[in-house]
Image (cartoon, rainbow, N blue to C red):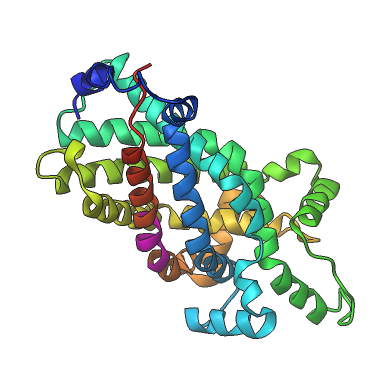
Amino acid sequence: MSVKDFRDEKVEISGLNSNLTARERLLQSNRTIVAASCAAWISVLAGFPFDSIKTRMQTHYYPSILSCIRITYAEEGARGFFRGMIPPLVTVSIIKSVSFSIYEGTKRSLLQDSGYKYDTLPDVLKVSSLSGGVSGAFIALLSCPLELVKIQRQLEQVMLKNQIEAGQVAANQVVEASSWKAVKQIVQRKGVFGLWSGVTCHSARDALGTGIYFGGYESMKRILSKEGSTTAGPLTHFMSGGFCGIMSWLIVFPVDAIKTNLQKDIMMPKPRYNGFMDCAISLAKKNGIKGLYRGLNVTLLRAFPIHSLNFLVYEQVLKSIPPSSS
């Protein structure tokens, strides 16, 4: 799609809104939000068990994915794979909607106001990567507290087991577990701003990862579309989404591993790490560089279908709601 296509879009659909109901106009004016919300719910429901396994493998030692699955199921049952899912499920539509809205808005601004081109593959890669980076950096401020609580919930049973083995908690002690309790514990120990623990690392991961994510998606969509991205079909959306999901995780996974360990460490009685570099060096010394990639296999196994579904649902919902002429 060229800059001219963006500018002419309203002209092409100017006659479509004359007979629309108020509900249809509301859908049109919020089509990005609706599409992103639908995609977000599908992604969370389908991908959360994989994310839970990834978090456990990043922060604790398991010989293999199957070993992690067996131990988790034996100790916590099926519920263990969905522990901590409610907060992201409730809030993910907001986060994803804001992310896609900022991305689309930034891209539109670059094309219409800043003189950027969108005619060649390098142009597409540059504009979409910049727009994605802006979106990721902003969204990190909203998602950091949610992800911190999610990680605490995902690991609470594993950490409780370690505390029992260390004699810090009685084996028969009943420990209340909920997302709200995790929030209260973080605030009690670290203050309100403790909910943003690790936000610098989180922002770096999301800015880099989201830039690669959108840049990879738009570029692959352009490559796979014989007649350009405006005529891309469902299969192109599906394949492009899977590609960008794998590509972004391959590059940002070590940063994500460090972030996860920092955010797990925040609630330990005696934190191990003094910051990003200290955590990175400690993990590398303990497990080698490959330790920064522990859990990558399950992440990549999850990445292709989840992100394929994400963009497939997003694009199909967008297609079902024509853009507003206003």
In this view of the protein, which residue sits in the foreground, 90 or 72? 90
Identify which residue is drawn at 90% across, 76% down.
173
Task: Please give left or right for residue 7 compared with residue 303 in the image.
Answer: left
- Where does residue 47 sit, x and y in percent of width and height? 48, 62
Query: Residue 303 magenta-drawn?
Result: yes
Magenta range: 301-307
Query: Residue 146 magenta-drawn?
Result: no
Where is 178 relative to 221, above or below? below
In the displayed image of the protein, which residue is found farthest to the front? 19
Task: Please give left or right for residue 10 compared with residue 45 in the image.
Answer: left
Identify which residue is drawn at 27% across, 49% down.
237
- Where does residue 162 sit, x and y in percent of width and height? 75, 76
In this view of the protein, which residue sits in the foreground, 174 or 96? 96
Identify which residue is drawn at 52% across, 63% down.
51
Task: Please give left or right for residue 51 compared with residue 164 in the image.
Answer: left
Where is 29 relative to 227, above or below? above
Of the 4 image quadrants, the one containing the N terminus is top left
Dividing the picture into quarters, in which one does residue 218 lie? top left
Where is 154 relative to 64, above or below? above
**Residue 136 appears in the rendering:** no
